[in-house]
Amino acid sequence: MSRLILITGGARSGKSSYAQNLAEALPGPRAFVATCPVTDAEMALRIDKHRQARSGQNWRTWEEPVDLPVALAQTTDCPTVLVDCLTLWINNLMYQEQTNSEEEVQLRCQSLINAVRRHPGTIIFVSGEVGLGIVPENREARLFRDLLGRCNQLLAASADQVTLVACGLPLHLKQ
């Protein structure tokens, strides 16, 4: 039976570490679905650091910036899947797929939720919480904030568990 967990928080809040520790407490083998494309040398170093943090912990890695339902379909032999992160997924949808409306994001999220429900294990999603700051001054940044906010709301509504991480501390919003 599938289980959906959403871990959210601000930049450098500790959400990815919290999600990884949670995943490593669950049965393996584990799948890590990475949505981050390598955009420059600094990003390549960040990605390598994340890979090293998972080494020796029975992880398999899939890199999929856009089609998360397909990635989940490829991980059905893993009882635990960590998708890091929805923030970059929305970014990739905006810039690679020209997704620019909440309706389009709603369709993508519903397809993702359907894929989770077909998966036999626990799927943990990491996502940034970008709605706590000021209203961005430009249209593109406001659109990104709105699309990610819609994505987070939809996944949280379908989630079995939602945790907000702030300052490295988890606050359980839904259990």
Image: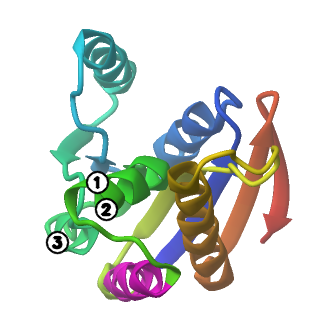
User: What residue does disc 3 label?
Assistant: 70
Which element type, helix, strand or loop, lies under badge 2? helix
Q: Which residue is found at the position 65% from the left and 26% from the top? A: 12
Q: Amino acid at mark 3?
A: Val
Q: Which residue is found at the position 14% from the left and 67% from the top? A: 74
Above or below, 64 relative to 161: above
Q: Which residue is found at the position 32% from the left and 19% from the top? A: 43
Q: CA distance from mark 3 to mark 2?
A: 15 Å
Label 2 close to label 1 by CB (< 8 Å) = yes
Label 3 close to label 2 by CB (< 8 Å) = no
Judged by its main secondary structure, the magenta piece is helix
Above or below, 84 relative to 57: below
Which element type, helix, strand or loop, lies under badge 1? helix
User: What residue does disc 1 label?
Assistant: 95
Q: Which quarter of the figure is the C terminus placed in?
A: bottom right
Which element type, helix, strand or loop, lies under badge 3? helix
The answer to which of 53 and 128 lies nearer the viewer is 128
Please state which of the two labelled residues, at mark 3 or mark 2, is closer to the viewer: 2
Please state which of the two labelled residues, at mark 2 or mark 1, is closer to the viewer: 1
Q: Amino acid at mark 2?
A: Leu
Find residue 99 and report its image quarter: bottom left
User: What residue does disc 2 label?
Assistant: 93
Q: Position of residue 52 (x, y in %)?
A: 31, 16
